[in-house]
Image: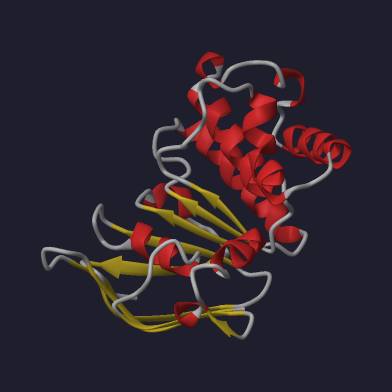
């Protein structure tokens, strides 16, 4: 499903976040991407999602080379993705319901279908009774659950999560990872970046390790 071939990413100023990285992710696979802060984990996920473009190399999703796609086509590609950002990117002046519904509103879904999907997504993450609440009233773990609901409300084939448990205690972190595993068990391809080795200790899922922009293992 995802084929990353010899990608490098150099930012203005000369900083090279990734250097000649190649990785394949099969359809329905769950993959952990580990490495120190600044290793290139976030950059890799953004390149897979088409949020950024590589300096060299290619990213192929379901047979489409997204590095050669025009900018007008990328929004349609991204409908296949759910992306959970490290800094949440929640709208704090909107309700839990409105935050979750945002991807569907942008895509032009009918109001009734939006309501049905939003409630289903919130139910999956345990926030069904908090539709009218503002994100500022939620705990850190609940805010992360809201981010997950927003990411899966459009039923994506690929779910990308950037350090989703970075600011959570061990109990909440375990619950969040359990949610990702549940999505993966119904066929969603999942990529999770993390620097928390305790999170993946004993995990059955494949893990790749980045070190200063290079694929170390």
Q: Residue at x 15, y 65 (%)?
A: 15
Q: Residue at x 76, y 19 (%)?
A: 129
Q: Position of residue 147 (x, y in %)?
A: 57, 38
Q: Nearer the viewer, residue 133 or 24?
A: 133
Q: Is residue 110 above or below residue 135?
A: below
Q: Nearer the viewer, residue 149 or 181?
A: 149
Q: Position of residue 202 (x, y in %)?
A: 51, 57
Q: Position of residue 126 (x, y in %)?
A: 72, 29
Quarter of the image with the C terminus in it: bottom left
Residue 189 is at least partly visible in this image: no
Q: Residue at x 64, y 25 (%)?
A: 96
Q: Residue at x 81, y 41 (%)?
A: 117
Instruction: State left or right for residue 137 relative to residue 157.
Output: left
Give the colour scheme of this rendering: secondary structure
Image-quadrant location for residue 46: bottom left
Quarter of the image with the N terminus in it: bottom right
Q: Position of residue 144 (x, y in %)?
A: 54, 34
Q: Nearer the viewer, residue 64 or 198?
A: 64
Q: Count how many numbered circles sit on residues in the image.
A: 0
Q: Is residue 159 above or below residue 16?
A: above
Instruction: State left or right for residue 124 relative to residue 77.
Output: right
Q: Is residue 214 above or below residue 42?
A: below
Instruction: State left or right for residue 97 relative to residue 110.
Output: left
Which residue in the rendered view is the most extreme toward the left?
13
Q: Is residue 61 above or below residue 173?
A: below
Q: Nearer the viewer, residue 124 or 84?
A: 84
Residue 91 is at least partly visible in this image: yes
């Amino acid at each position: 499903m995802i084929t990353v071939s010899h990608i490098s990413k150099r930012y203005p100023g000369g900083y090279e976040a990734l250097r000649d990285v190649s990785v394949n992710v099969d359809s329905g696979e769950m993959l952990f991407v580990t490495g120190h802060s600044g290793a290139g984990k976030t950059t890799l996920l953004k390149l897979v999602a088409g949020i950024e473009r590589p300096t060299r190399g290619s990213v192929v999703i379901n047979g489409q080379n997204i590095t050669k796609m025009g900018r007008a086509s990328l929004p349609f590609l991204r409908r296949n993705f759910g992306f959970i950002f490290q800094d949440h990117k929640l709208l704090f002046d909107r309700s839990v319901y409105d935050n979750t519904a945002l991807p569907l509103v942008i895509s032009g879904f009918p109001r009734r279908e939006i309501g049905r999907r939003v409630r289903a997504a919130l139910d999956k993450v345990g926030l069904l009774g908090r539709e009218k609440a503002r994100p500022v009233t939620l705990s850190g773990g609940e805010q992360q659950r809201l981010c997950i609901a927003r990411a899966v409300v459009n039923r994506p084939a690929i779910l990308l999560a950037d350090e989703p448990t970075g600011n959570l205690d061990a109990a909440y972190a375990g619950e969040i990872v359990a949610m990702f595993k549940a999505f993966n068990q119904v066929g969603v391809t999942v990529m999770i970046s993390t620097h928390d080795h305790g999170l993946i200790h004993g995990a059955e899922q494949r893990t790749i390790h980045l070190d200063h922009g290079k694929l170390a293992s």
